[in-house]
Image: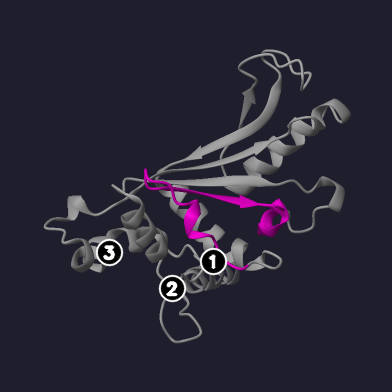
C-alpha cells in the first residue's frame, strides 16, 4: 500500500513539473502548442484565410562533421554517434564521403560525420529542450543572426559545444564537439519563416 502511494506521488510530481507555470505565473507553451496557434498569431500580418496557409515544421536535422579528426582517433565517429543519439533520442546515421578528395586524404565511402533527422513528436520535444534549456546555457550567446534564415524558409544554427545539452553536461573538454541544427519549415519566404521561427521561440538578434 505504501509502495503504491509512493509511486502515485512520484507520478504526480512528474506531471506537475511538466505543467508548472513559469516565473511570471503563465504556463510555458510547448512547441506543439505554438505550431497549433501559429495561424491565429500570424494571420493578421500575413492575411491567412485558413489554417492550412500557416507555416509548419517539416523536420529538424542535427549533423556533426568529423573531418580530419578520424585520422587521429579511429573511434571518434563511434563516440560522436553515441552522443548524438543520446542528445536527440534517436539513433544517428553515419555520413560517408560521396567522392574521394586527395587534398583532404579522403576516400570514397569514408565516414566523415553523423546525422539525425527528427520529425513529429521527437522533433517537437527536441526543440523544446534546445530552445528552452540548451541555448540559454550557451556561453556568451547573443542571439541568432536573422541572416541565417534562407529564402526557402529554413534556418541553420551552429553550436560550438555539444555539452550545452543536459545529457552531456559533464563532458571532458577534449571530447567536446560542435554541431549544426537545421530547422526546416513550410514557410513560403524568408519574412514568413523569420516571423514563424521567432514565434516558436528562436532567439533572433534584435534588428
Residue pictured at 16% horizontal, 61% vertical:
47
Residue pictured at 44% horizontal, 72% vertical:
19
Residue pictured at 61% horizontal, 68% vertical:
142
Mark 3 burial class by Cα count in 10 Å: few <14, some 14-19, many 20+: some
Q: Nearer the viewer, mark 3 or mark 2?
A: 3
Disc 3, SS: loop
Q: Earlier in the sequence, mark 3 or mark 2?
A: 2
3 or 146, which is in the foreground? 146
Q: Are marks 1 and 2 in contact (CB under 8 Å)?
A: yes
Query: On the image, numbered disc 1 is attached to which residue?
Result: 132
Say if residue 81 shows up in the picture: yes
Query: On the image, numbered disc 3 is attached to which residue?
Result: 37
At which x and y percent is residue 67? 74, 30
Whole-angstrom CA distance, mark 1 to mark 3, is 18 Å
At which x and y percent is residue 180? 60, 45
50 or 86, which is in the foreground? 50
Query: On the image, numbered disc 2 is attached to which residue?
Result: 28
Magenta-colored stretch includes residue 164: yes
Q: Which residues are magenta?
A: 142-167
At which x and y percent is residue 97? 65, 20
Residue 195 got which mark?
A: none
Q: Earlier in the sequence, mark 1 or mark 3?
A: 3
Q: In this picture, is 205 found above or below 162?
A: below
Q: Answer with left or right where residue 112 lies relative to residue 19.
A: right
Amino acid at each position: 500500500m505504501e509502495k503504491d502511494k509512493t509511486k502515485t506521488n512520484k507520478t504526480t510530481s512528474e506531471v506537475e513539473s511538466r505543467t508548472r507555470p513559469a516565473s511570471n505565473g503563465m504556463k510555458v507553451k510547448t512547441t506543439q502548442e505554438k505550431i497549433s496557434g501559429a495561424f491565429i498569431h500570424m494571420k493578421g500580418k500575413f492575411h491567412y484565410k485558413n489554417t492550412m496557409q500557416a507555416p509548419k515544421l517539416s523536420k529538424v536535422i542535427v549533423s556533426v562533421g568529423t573531418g580530419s579528426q578520424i585520422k587521429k582517433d579511429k573511434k571518434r565517429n563511434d563516440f560522436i554517434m553515441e552522443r548524438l543519439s543520446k542528445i536527440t533520442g534517436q539513433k544517428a546515421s553515419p555520413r560517408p564521403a560521396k567522392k574521394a578528395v586527395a587534398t583532404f586524404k579522403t576516400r570514397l565511402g569514408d565516414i566523415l560525420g553523423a546525422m539525425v533527422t527528427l520529425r513529429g513528436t521527437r522533433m517537437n520535444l527536441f526543440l523544446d529542450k534546445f530552445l528552452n534549456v540548451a541555448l540559454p546555457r550557451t556561453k556568451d550567446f547573443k542571439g541568432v543572426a536573422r541572416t541565417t534564415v534562407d529564402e526557402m524558409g529554413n534556418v541553420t544554427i551552429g553550436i560550438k559545444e555539444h555539452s550545452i545539452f543536459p545529457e552531456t553536461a559533464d563532458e571532458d573538454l577534449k571530447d567536446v564537439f560542435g554541431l549544426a541544427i537545421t530547422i526546416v519549415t513550410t514557410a513560403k519566404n524568408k519574412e514568413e519563416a523569420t516571423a514563424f521561427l521567432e514565434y516558436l521561440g528562436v532567439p533572433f538578434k534584435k534588428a
